[in-house]
Image (cartoon, helix red, strand yellow):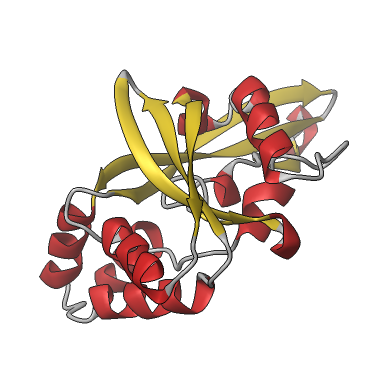
Amino acid sequence: MEKKSFNLFYFVILISGVLYTNVCFSQNTPTTWQDRLEALKNSFNEENRGDVSFLKLLGYTYKGIIGSQTVKSDIIDSLLSYNAPAILHLPPIVMRDTVSRGDSCVIRERVLPKFEIISIRKRLEIAESIGEKSLLTSLRQQLNNLIHLDYEYLELEWSYKNKHFKSLCVVSNEHGGFIYDPIGSNILEYTTTTTTNTVERLNSKENLH
């Protein structure tokens, strides 16, 4: 049972850029990855969304087009290098508020994301410690299927909890904008705060006798 819980929080599958863009830009969505990056720089942490509020996109550098299989392989190697960034998801932050309304109360529960940015090396060590021997092979296969020739790639610079990180980001305006980034693609899925309201009826004094 503990092993399943560990896997749930600490290992997420690679996700496509659909999540990368849809969560952050629900209205007035920019039409290109260039415009989306500028919007992301300006609005990423405007709302308090748990640990996401500490994450800031500082800038990016355009690197070029993935014009050959060699370039594609080099990018995948860089994404999976031991010092490359990876996301470690932690149990979420749960905040509860109780508001009394006459003979009842409303309990509001907000679930906020919590995570750390670690290295691929550390992620592989954690995987191996719980018996995930083929994580690197699985990640490489998923990236190989996700990244194609003629896509473009960038280097993004992030700030998180007073530390700076750089990541390679694959994009294509012809295929939805953002394709993959090891930080953004594995975080933005969790940026929406989940709020649930529960109404409970209070015991009246008459019911106590």
- Is residue 208 visible in the rendered image? The answer is no
Residue sitting at 70 percent across and 29 percent down?
39
Residue 159 or 33: which is nearer the viewer?
33
Residue 62 spot, x, y in % from top left: 50, 40
Left or right, 193 with respect to 129, comes to: right
Where 117 sits versus 162, above or below?
below
Q: Residue at (41%, 31%) from the top-left corner?
A: 157
Q: In the rendered view, would you say 12 is above or below 187? A: below
In the foreground, 5 or 79: 79
Estimate the x, y position of residue 176 in percent, counting from the top left.
Answer: 72, 59
Left or right of residue 33: residue 88: left
For the C terminus, which image quadrant? top right
- Count of labels shown? 0
* Placement of 179 over or under 141, stated as above or below: above
- Foreground residue among 95 and 16: 16
Q: In x, y percent, where is residue 144?
A: 43, 76
Q: Is residue 85 visible?
A: yes
Name the residue rendered at 34%, 71% in the picture: 70
Q: Please name the residue shown 81% across and 45% down the image.
A: 31
Quarter of the rendering containing residue 15: bottom right
14 left or right, relative to 167: right
Where is residue 100, by image quadrant?
Answer: top right
Res. 179 image quadrant? bottom right
Residue lying at the far front of the rendered structure: 67
Measuring from the top left, give residue 48's x and y in whole percent. Answer: 59, 23
Q: Where the N terminus falls, by quadrant?
A: bottom left
